[in-house]
Amino acid sequence: MVSFGSFLKGLFNYSMEPQRADPRQGHFSEIARSAKIGRNVVFGDWSSVGCFTTIGDNVMFGPWAKVGNDCVIGNDVQLGSHTRVAAGSYVAPGTILGDHDLVTKNGVIPDRCSGSMVQEDANGAFRVITSVAIFMIPAGIFNSYDDVSEALDLWQWGETYHDPAKDLEHFRI
C-alpha cells in the first residue's frame, strides 16, 4: 500500500535543493512528475509546471514562469519571466509571451503578474499598487496582510477570493 506522503512525492519534485540532474531544469524548479515534457525544453530558475500538463518541443521558460495543472503548451513557445498560465489553459504553437503575462482560458492579460506593493495604514485599511491597477481596501475587510497577499495572488492568477465580497476588483480605483 502506498502512503499519502509517497503519493504526493510521486506527483511533485518538492525538494528546495537545486535540481540539476537534467541540465534543462533551472535551479529550484518544481515540475510535476505527471507532466509530459517535450524535447529541447529549457526551464528557468524557480519555474514550475503543474500536474497532468503537456509541454511541447522547443519551449523556453523564463525565470519564475508558472504553468498550472492540466495545461497544454504547444511547440516553439516562449514564456517570459514571471508569466503565469492558469489551470486548464492552452498556449498555441509559436506563441511568445512577454514578462508578467497571465494566460487564462479566455486569453492573455498583459503585465498582470508584475510586482506589487501592499501598504497598511494605522486604521487597518490597505492600499495595493500593481503596474496595472491600484486597490483601496477599507479597514475591516481583510484581517491581516497575509489575507491581502492571498487575495492579490489569486487576482494575479485571474481567480477570485473565496469570499466574493473580498474580490480585489471591488476595490479598484
Image (spheres, grey):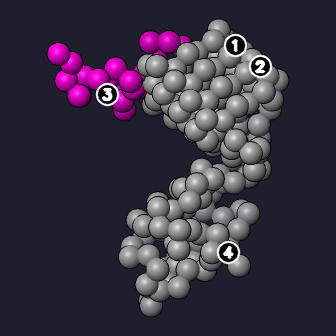
For residue 102, say whether it is visible: yes
CA–CA distance in space, label 1 to label 2: 6 Å
Q: Earlier in the sequence, mark 1 or mark 4?
A: 1
- Mark 2 lies on residue: 76
CA neighbours of label 3 inside 10 A, class few (<14), some (14 to 19), many (20+):
few
Q: Identity of the amino acid at label 2?
A: Asp
Q: Identity of the amino acid at label 3?
A: Leu
CA–CA distance in space, label 2 to label 3: 31 Å
Q: Identity of the amino acid at label 1?
A: Asp
Res 57 label: 1
Taking 51 as reference, is 145 above or below it? below
Please, what secondary structure does the residue beneath circle 1 have?
loop
- Mark 3 lies on residue: 8
Q: Earlier in the sequence, mark 3 or mark 4?
A: 3
| Left/right of residue 128 with respect to residue 16 in the rendered view | right
Identified at 71% across, 79% down, the residue is 173
| Left/right of residue 92 with respect to residue 42 in the rendered view | right
Q: Are marks 1 and 4 in contact (CB under 8 Å)?
A: no
Q: Earlier in the sequence, mark 1 or mark 2?
A: 1
Q: Earlier in the sequence, mark 2 or mark 3?
A: 3
- Mark 4 lies on residue: 172
| Left/right of residue 78 with respect to residue 61 in the rendered view | right
- Find residue 134 and report its image quarter: bottom right
Please, what secondary structure does the residue beneath circle 2 have?
loop
| Residue segment shown in magenta | 1-23
Taking 87 as reference, is 60 above or below it? above
| Left/right of residue 73 with respect to residue 3 in the rendered view | right
Identified at 39% across, 73% down, the residue is 144
Residue 60: percent from left, percent from top = 68, 24
Residue closest to the eye, 128 or 19: 128
Q: How many marks?
A: 4
